[in-house]
Amino acid sequence: MSTLDAAPTALIVHAHPEPHSFSTAQMATAAQALRDTGYRVDILDLYADAWSPVLAREEFAPAEGPFKPQAAQMRAIEDGTLDATVKAHLDRLLAADLLVLSFPMWWFSLPAILKGWVDRVFVMGGVFGGDHGLFGDAALAGKQAMLLLTTGGPSESFHPEGTFGPMEDFLFHIHRGMLEFVGYHVLNPVITYGPAHMTDQERAAALESVRDSVTLIAGETGTSRAYAAR
Ligand SMILES: Cc1cc2nc3c(=O)[nH]c(=O)nc-3n(C[C@H](O)[C@H](O)[C@H](O)COP(=O)(O)O)c2cc1C
């Protein structure tokens, strides 16, 4: 087995419509930091790939009775009839040791294109339910996930006494409701607050900080898997 074969894989799922955005630069910086610490990096750029976030009945084989999305997902896994694009993304997800969701915070949550990726690719029967359980019994147990995001608001606004309230409250539905739900161990998020208000020099420093944070996390998880973020 070559060194590359033995390398852990990181899947970065990126959701920003502008290739020249800070968010996209942050994603590229994180990708390089992961490569530098020995990860093989797989990048899914949802806007560039014109990913459709809509979970629609048309992607499933016709069935009797009302359309029940999770039942349809289970059946598609069992029958091997999962939509080809969704199946390809699911295979890349299952092959990854580390999942990184990269996005700008929109409405204190994920951009719709990324939420729709979770809707369609975190398939019932494929990553939880069916032969898998939930949380520690789900298909991605033993793997790691982290969020890589930017905000419009400054960090003070996301302090417990700040205008918005604690950042961890906004991330809870992603950390617990999506990532831990399907088995991931969730690492600390890497966040750049308010890049739109930064000078070029400050942006460069912020990217350096992203590189350091990702290197630290990846260095601690890549080989030993011993990192405990919480
Ligand atoms: C639809 C939309 C919703 C947004 N919602 C939030 C929000 O809830 N909280 C916040 O801090 N910034 C919000 N923003 C600002 C973006 O997070 C911010 O512009 C982005 O993270 C900056 O990174 P970029 O320059 O790479 O886009 C929103 C922006 C858009 C377009």
Image: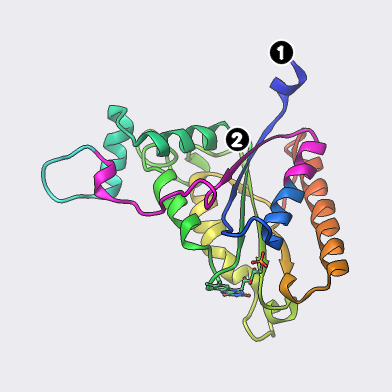
Q: Quadrant of the N terminus?
A: top right
Residue 50: percent from left, percent from top: 47, 49
Where ligand 1 lies, by image quadrant?
Answer: bottom right
Q: Nearer the viewer, residue 40 or 157?
A: 40
Whether residue 132 can be seen here: no
Label 2: which secondary element: loop
Question: For mark 2, what is the residue?
Answer: 96
Q: Is residue 75 magenta?
A: no
Q: Is residue 59 magenta?
A: yes
Q: Image height check: is 81 above or below 191?
A: above
Residue 115: percent from left, percent from top: 47, 57
Whether residue 160 can be seen here: yes
Callout 1 crowding tier (Cα within 10 Å): few <14, some 14–19, many ≥20: few
Q: CA distance from mark 1 to mark 2?
A: 18 Å
Callout 2 crowding tier (Cα within 10 Å): few <14, some 14–19, many ≥20: many
Magenta segment range? 31-60
